[in-house]
Amino acid sequence: MTACTECGADVVLPDDLEVGEIVDCDTCGTELEVIETAPPSLDRAPELAEDWGE
Amino acid sequence: MTACTECGADVVLPDDLEVGEIVDCDTCGTELEVIETAPPSLDRAPELAEDWGE
Amino acid sequence: MAATERDASASGGETATASVVGASGFAGGELLRLLAGHPGFEVAQATSREHANRTVGSVHPNLRSLDLRFADPGDLDAVDVLFAAAPHGVAMEYIEEWRDLTDTVVDLSADFRLDSESQYDEWYDGHSAPDHLDDAVYALPELSRGDLAGADLIASGGCNATATILGLLPLHEAGLLEGAQVVVDVKVGSSEGGAGGGPASSHPERSGVVRPYAPTGHRHEAEIEQALGLSVSFTAHAVDMVRGASATCHIFPAETPSKGDLWAAFRETYGDEPFVETVAGGSGTYRYPEPKVVAGTNDAEIGFEVDPENGRVVTFAAIDNVVKGSAGQAVHAANLALGYEETAGLDQFGLHPVGSP
Amino acid sequence: MAATERDASASGGETATASVVGASGFAGGELLRLLAGHPGFEVAQATSREHANRTVGSVHPNLRSLDLRFADPGDLDAVDVLFAAAPHGVAMEYIEEWRDLTDTVVDLSADFRLDSESQYDEWYDGHSAPDHLDDAVYALPELSRGDLAGADLIASGGCNATATILGLLPLHEAGLLEGAQVVVDVKVGSSEGGAGGGPASSHPERSGVVRPYAPTGHRHEAEIEQALGLSVSFTAHAVDMVRGASATCHIFPAETPSKGDLWAAFRETYGDEPFVETVAGGSGTYRYPEPKVVAGTNDAEIGFEVDPENGRVVTFAAIDNVVKGSAGQAVHAANLALGYEETAGLDQFGLHPVGSP
Amino acid sequence: MAATERDASASGGETATASVVGASGFAGGELLRLLAGHPGFEVAQATSREHANRTVGSVHPNLRSLDLRFADPGDLDAVDVLFAAAPHGVAMEYIEEWRDLTDTVVDLSADFRLDSESQYDEWYDGHSAPDHLDDAVYALPELSRGDLAGADLIASGGCNATATILGLLPLHEAGLLEGAQVVVDVKVGSSEGGAGGGPASSHPERSGVVRPYAPTGHRHEAEIEQALGLSVSFTAHAVDMVRGASATCHIFPAETPSKGDLWAAFRETYGDEPFVETVAGGSGTYRYPEPKVVAGTNDAEIGFEVDPENGRVVTFAAIDNVVKGSAGQAVHAANLALGYEETAGLDQFGLHPVGSP
Amino acid sequence: MAATERDASASGGETATASVVGASGFAGGELLRLLAGHPGFEVAQATSREHANRTVGSVHPNLRSLDLRFADPGDLDAVDVLFAAAPHGVAMEYIEEWRDLTDTVVDLSADFRLDSESQYDEWYDGHSAPDHLDDAVYALPELSRGDLAGADLIASGGCNATATILGLLPLHEAGLLEGAQVVVDVKVGSSEGGAGGGPASSHPERSGVVRPYAPTGHRHEAEIEQALGLSVSFTAHAVDMVRGASATCHIFPAETPSKGDLWAAFRETYGDEPFVETVAGGSGTYRYPEPKVVAGTNDAEIGFEVDPENGRVVTFAAIDNVVKGSAGQAVHAANLALGYEETAGLDQFGLHPVGSP
Ligand SMILES: NC(=O)c1ccc[n+]([C@@H]2O[C@H](COP(=O)([O-])OP(=O)(O)OC[C@H]3O[C@@H](n4cnc5c(N)ncnc54)[C@H](OP(=O)(O)O)[C@@H]3O)[C@@H](O)[C@H]2O)c1
Ligand SMILES: NC(=O)c1ccc[n+]([C@@H]2O[C@H](COP(=O)([O-])OP(=O)(O)OC[C@H]3O[C@@H](n4cnc5c(N)ncnc54)[C@H](OP(=O)(O)O)[C@@H]3O)[C@@H](O)[C@H]2O)c1
Ligand SMILES: NC(=O)c1ccc[n+]([C@@H]2O[C@H](COP(=O)([O-])OP(=O)(O)OC[C@H]3O[C@@H](n4cnc5c(N)ncnc54)[C@H](OP(=O)(O)O)[C@@H]3O)[C@@H](O)[C@H]2O)c1
Ligand SMILES: NC(=O)c1ccc[n+]([C@@H]2O[C@H](COP(=O)([O-])OP(=O)(O)OC[C@H]3O[C@@H](n4cnc5c(N)ncnc54)[C@H](OP(=O)(O)O)[C@@H]3O)[C@@H](O)[C@H]2O)c1
Ligand SMILES: [Zn+2]
Ligand SMILES: [Zn+2]
């Protein structure tokens, strides 16, 4: 159980996660990258900006 | 309880119906006009044809 | 199709009788749908003058499995709860009669939403039964849950007002609206106009529009102001959907909050609300509130974003105007009034994928 | 939003565990929605390779209230019922593994719908697990209810085949199809293509179309022929909706029946069916079957008209392709296989008004 | 916006005056649009009873740049060509008056399409001016080009009939329809119903439909039979678009032709037609005719496919019902009647991408 | 279909050669459509890497009558005018090469819209050919008509920026924007995303949306600020249409003007503009600007309303994003650069009725 860096909510992590995997916060939906596993630590994953032409 | 002229299903009529009122058959949806009330008798109501231009 | 059986456990076993005035309309049809699936209600009568004696399914094809015919509103019997979904003005005309027939009137029109006769003079064409205004409780449970238990005259909120108020409430409670400039830009579907639309709502004219239909001076400003103590600059656009109201609020607070501040405020206001979901960013296709996600449900999606360059907070609110914005809100309020479980009869999921419900 | 609580009474109190393979797809998402509201199932796992570890709500925004993350299909645990909604070819590849994990596989793909390997050679690119074909029961309960009790490999029907078969079944049973020429003209929504559409299914290209997409030789002809012993001339058009399949069958029987004959035939076939409604004429706006009326539900609307001038019977069938045409049919079949009440978890009403769901 | 200037070269320099009866309607509005961009016509009057004296732009917002107001149909002046786009029955009532005012009447209604009074007795409610039937030339130029030069009463074809006839004409000319069973399954947009739609054509009810609206016995069967000497089994469905008619014809000829035979037949019939494009297979997203590709234009896309298993030919025809199916066809016919260049005023391109025009 | 012949009179008889880079895209396709109907241009080459050697009609079905195949962008020949409609970043990469091949480059991307390298550092990822920035003229002719004659590098504006600037320009010129708070709430169609959309732009996901896609920080803020000297609070929503951008601007000026003041300001700014129509109230269904009215045309509709209670002016602007918002604006600018008649090739009428173009 780790805090989401975006909204502060607790994120329940699957136990077999590896460093580099992506999970989303189930409160705010932000994609979080697993930085470390023991103890678990998360950071906002690099985002693919939606590219609208215009 | 009267038979629908279109599909033959039984139509349960509200008891305060008057001659000339319209009910729809709850099986086939046909609009039925009350011709007599005692005993109840029904006939297909004149239909307004949908008028598409074209 | 066999009639659907449901047990009444969510309401503690008891079943109340309910009738619906205006049952051939859009909001009235939704009341019938929700009550038919509600364990605590049994529908007694559904009124329509035009379709009296015809089956409910002849107007609402989704309800063909109900064994129910429209009754004339003049033939209403006594009932536990009377829901009314007639146009503005009808409820104030019949309110005495209705209150004689039932202990609980839940009215979906604007007739009892405002607190005082003077507001009706200002925003509408006055009021013909002002004595009942004091008895009325505004339904939006996120705002007035505490007053709804045992209420006997409930005024269900307007759909655009509901979306706007829900989008602003966390900021209001966090004190962020004090002295703030607020612009509300709303996009709505065609069911807001009701079943009796005119030429502008024919399919060829109404399809594909982004049509400003209430550029300024919308009557729902009155409800919003009453709820939040704040005058907002409101503009509504008709867009190409049938169900749905989406309110984008642009707020310029005295001081710009951080995203964390806003998450805290939203969690504070909506953390325990059964029908409100905060959707604010995240990943995937659906990052902010969208009306199509909540179509057919009593859910509201509310979200926000911060614009530090311009000192602005933007909030987004999406509801189904005929459910959370009217019939669902009314049932939710009735659940609270009768002491039923709050979510009874209102636990439908939305659809995915879905087009333009 | 609080998770929805439902009691398990419709299933006699017992609760089976269920997992869904292909849960990030359109049919898989519908399985999750229906199982979440089903009193007799508890979802154990939902697979997606691409979205493993992410919340189900990140893909299906209507399911944000579910507390569930996607699992990798390689990590499947033993379960009571395994629903599979992967593309054609996947089930035949994994069927051995899956049957080791569960007693009941319900597959939504075409992999086990046809009776024999030779049919797969003719209509598909062969079959890699033909030994299992004999075990499979075709799911359409209106056709095969009797075989479904205790079935351990269920092949849920194709959506276009389902609509067509339901539109023809009463005529088939009344002997009216013998030697008849049959044209089937189908109109379908974009969700039929699944979540992974190509350029032709982008919004700008796919909007507003009446696009012949399978002018001749559609693979569902095989299923229809197997079900009814009759070769049909089948053509499908993509139209602008997301959900829905509508099959218009033009039949030239040896002798033209009367409307009364047809009402009798339809009553005979569908009189007791919980999910089929006969809609054939009548009054009001909705006189024949329409897919938008049944969107989101497991209902099928079936209707007919007689054309005495041309010696023709026309039947209309409307379903929601991702419910009655796949996920709902699968749950219906599972209810029968497990001895649950037939309608358990499938009692949603459609919406009215509704745009283009 | 400055009025658009166009030169009259396409018509050899001369300019005819034209008036439009029923100019506030959908077909009438298209006549105004096409005539405004036509080098050989100058619009004298445009009638509407309801909107008399208002600007044309108040009804047709796309024509705000035209400096023209509606006149009452009782105030019509003499003119070179009178186009009439009023509902069925109006032209037969006023035909004498109109022919006194002009040398060339082009009527878009069904009033002069059929050859004989007896056909009107059979398919309509008789005819009140049968003496004029002999003078009338059916407009579809691909069928009757030779008769149109100098015609003084032109009966523009029905939109569904136009699509169907164009889809069948090459087979007819190649002798492939003799003794053939023919099913015509049509999908149409909401503008077919005209500007004065009822409740079924309101946006909430008409959106997203696949609605059988003329299951059997459609009046256009009469036109098709007259044109091709063949009775067809016709069914029309309303689908969610505003403009467009798409006819899928399923033909069972005595002997099944090859694709090569069909290409030859289509080339023979349409090789030199300025407004018909054969679209039959190919690559990319748009492989068969689609109405949205031709929306706003006078073009027809016609295609075909062979189904050897079932001994069937399928043809597809797509047009814009208010252009090629009415106003454009009428202008095309007038061009031929007056000896103008055939394509004058009708050279618009369709749009890509485009949604649901 | 026979190729359309047009005379070159509008351009004084001369004809320039033009090529289009990015011709398989949405804006590129519109350039081809407009140039094909333009009397002063002859298209030499149309590039696509993916579709090289295929016919233009295989991608743009509306252009099947053009006798033209895609060329590889590496095979470009010298030409009078080179139009480029490639994604952001391509023009800056090839600008040297292109200017060697032609005297006039008209670029539709954002690559040369901003004045200085530092703006590209701030809003984009820098600029790789900053030396050309000084030569570039921003295309919006209502803003920069005077600078376009003889321009040899033209930067066509962004579609949302175009709509916003046109909605604010009269107020800007009347001094009403000084110190004003401005909120811009934009609704756009799916063609804005270009032909290469991702999962969020598939038909099932993109249909029926009111989807906030750029809540804050949209790059077009830079263009607007450069044009008007004013920072605006900008939010864009995707709605269910293919073509169209609609900008609603909420302005709080120092002093609230009257409707008469605003009519005067709009008349001053747009009275002589060939492509701008002021639509502000009036009667009938279409009272304010709507994108569907101008779809397929180079017209902009601009309107306004005053909200005295809140001290607010609301302006509405509606354009077709791929015409007035890109390809049409580019042709308009090229007309001015070459000394052609300003409206040459751009005199199409919109459609009525029309669905969701
Ligand atoms: N649509 C929405 O999104 C929405 C949202 C929030 C609140 N509301 C409110 O809900 C109410 C109904 O709206 P709606 O959209 O459902 O309208 P609607 O579709 O036009 O339906 C109105 C209904 O009222 C009945 N009615 C009309 N006059 C009546 C009278 N004098 N006495 C008794 N019944 C009468 C009509 O049936 P007969 O004429 O056949 O009797 C019809 O059933 C309105 O007050 C509206 O403001 C609607
Ligand atoms: N859509 C309909 O209307 C409809 C109707 C009747 C029947 N069906 C049938 O239902 C099935 C699913 O259709 P759909 O429309 O839902 O398709 P879809 O949206 O494309 O979904 C396919 C699902 O399968 C998963 N998947 C793909 N390859 C896989 C593999 N090798 N192993 C495990 N999972 C795999 C995908 O997720 P990951 O790639 O992330 O694992 C995705 O969740 C098909 O067989 C289809 O014929 C669909
Ligand atoms: N829509 C199509 O796709 C289509 C295709 C092929 C053919 N058509 C034919 O074109 C005709 C017009 O169809 P539409 O769809 O344009 O219909 P519409 O939109 O309803 O327009 C009808 C027009 O006729 C006028 N009108 C009605 N009664 C009249 C009368 N007694 N005398 C003079 N004018 C009268 C109306 O204006 P006022 O009432 O204000 O005078 C209106 O301008 C019909 O005959 C239709 O069959 C239509
Ligand atoms: N869509 C709008 O509403 C709109 C409005 C205003 C401005 N614009 C601008 O117009 C431009 C095009 O937009 P769009 O919507 O038309 O995009 P699009 O549909 O994606 O088309 C892009 C075109 O550029 C070509 N292309 C891509 N990379 C290229 C390269 N490296 N070299 C040469 N050609 C390349 C593509 O074809 P191949 O890959 O086959 O070569 C395709 O023809 C963009 O800069 C956009 O910002 C668009
Ligand atoms: Zn979070
Ligand atoms: Zn009946």
Image: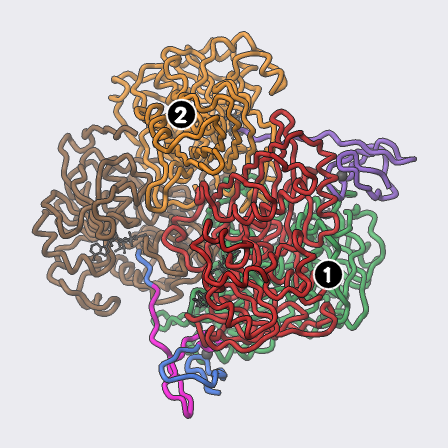
Chain colours: A purple, B blue, C red, D green, E brown, F orange
Q: Residue at x 77, y 58 (%)?
A: D82
Q: Which residues are magenta?
A: B24-50
Residue F46 appears in the picture as rendered: yes
Identify whether D10 is placed above or below C236.
below
Q: Residue furthest right?
A: A38
Whether C67 is drawn above or below E345: the answer is below
Name the residue type under label 1.
Val
Residue bearing mark 2: F170
Image-based side of F241 in relation to E102, left or right: right
Q: Nearer the viewer, residue E180 or D253?
A: D253
Q: Position of residue E84 (x, y in %)?
A: 20, 51
Q: Horizontal and vertical percent for residue E253?
A: 38, 59
Identify the subunit bearing mark 2.
F
Q: Is residue D279 visible?
A: no
Report the quarter where the C terminus of chain F lies: top left
Q: Is residue C311 left or right of residue D285?
A: right
* As drawn, D331 above or below F343: below
Q: Residue at x 48, y 66 (%)?
A: C24
